[in-house]
Image (spheres, helix red, strand yellow):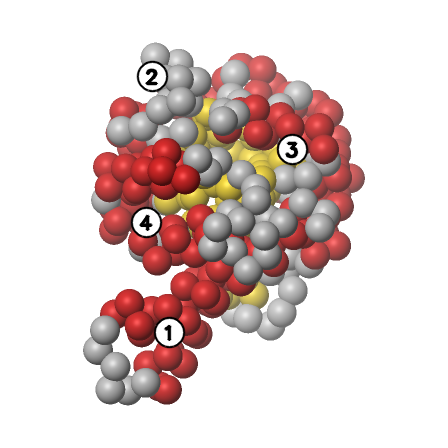
Amino acid sequence: MKTLREYIEEAEARHVAIGHFNVSNIEAVWAIARAASHRGGTQPELDLPVIIGVSEGERDFIGVRQVAALVKSIREEFDQPIFLNADHTYSFDRVKEAIEVGFDAVIFDGSKLPFDENLVETKKCVDYAKKFPTPDGSEVIVEAELGYIGTSSKLLDTIPEDVNLGEDALVKPEQAAMFVRETEIDLFAPAVGNVHGMLKSGVDPALDIVRIKLIREAAGVPLVLHGASGNTEDDLRRAIAAGVAVVHINTELRVAYRDALKQSLQENPDEVAPYKILKPAILAMQKVVETKLKIFNNL
């Protein structure tokens, strides 16, 4: 099996993107694994690499070692290219923790820090990651962010007050080039008009596709699009064509889980078996993942 790094390089070469889907429980892990595999998916053509993401809160809920063991066991038992990322990690100690238990990738999120402090802390994470191989023997992939796009994957009434989508607030190509050069990160997540969460009113603001292309050219490493729940299919396809190699989805999965679970409880008020109550929620998340993977892979 190829390494995650090789899958990302291959995705870029083919002008497609790898789907990164966050989880908060075991049900979501299986929904994503089945969607990306011919074994359990409803669409056999989606036999694709996929990344499971867990933020600090999500991995605290599931268990840091436990989620690492689960994803590794699925990869080994089914020979499936499913990888694990420590999403949105705000301290060196939490990055260190994820690296040491066998995560394939980590994100140091210093987007709220001053530029110089973000750079120093990111480089510290990169240097530490080089000391620990991943379960497949390759180096841990390290990603970092510039530009603040919010922190919560939830439904939004409006764009959060502390998120500035003005042109001056978005990442500039020259900033990206300097940051990547000085930190030696493997993946770069810039603010390009994206925002965490999803507007209740409908579609999120448009992405700055020209900026994405310029940043990719300047940075010299693959780009990651965070907060892609709520973006249009056209925006996602154009962003991938411009240089995005990994796309993050979380809020849409959470909404699908909640809505399906609510309906399941309403329709089966006497059911007490969790695996029966939760089955519709798993299928709803699986459908979201399948739909996104088709978009990301031009299918």
Q: Which mark is residue 58?
A: 4
Mark-to-mark CA distance, 4 and 1:
19 Å
Where is mark 3, residue-wise?
Answer: 11
Q: Amino acid at mark 2?
A: Phe
Left/right placement of residue 289 relative to residue 107 reads: right
> Which of the two discs, 3 and 4, labels the residue nearer the N terminus?
3
85 or 184: which is nearer to us? Answer: 85
Residue 261 falls in which quadrant of the image?
bottom left
Mark-to-mark CA distance, 2 and 1:
40 Å
Which callout, 4 or 1, points to the residue nearer the camera? Answer: 1
Mark-to-mark CA distance, 3 and 2:
25 Å
Q: Amino acid at mark 1?
A: Leu
> Which of the two discs, 1 and 3, labels the residue nearer the N terminus?
3
Q: Amino acid at mark 3?
A: Ala
Q: Position of residue 72 (x, y in %)?
A: 34, 35
180 or 116: which is nearer to us? Answer: 180
Numbered disc 1: secondary structure: helix
Mark-to-mark CA distance, 4 and 2:
23 Å
Marks 3 and 4 in Cβ contact (< 8 Å): no
Which callout, 3 or 2, points to the residue nearer the camera? Answer: 3
Where is mark 2, residue-wise?
Answer: 132
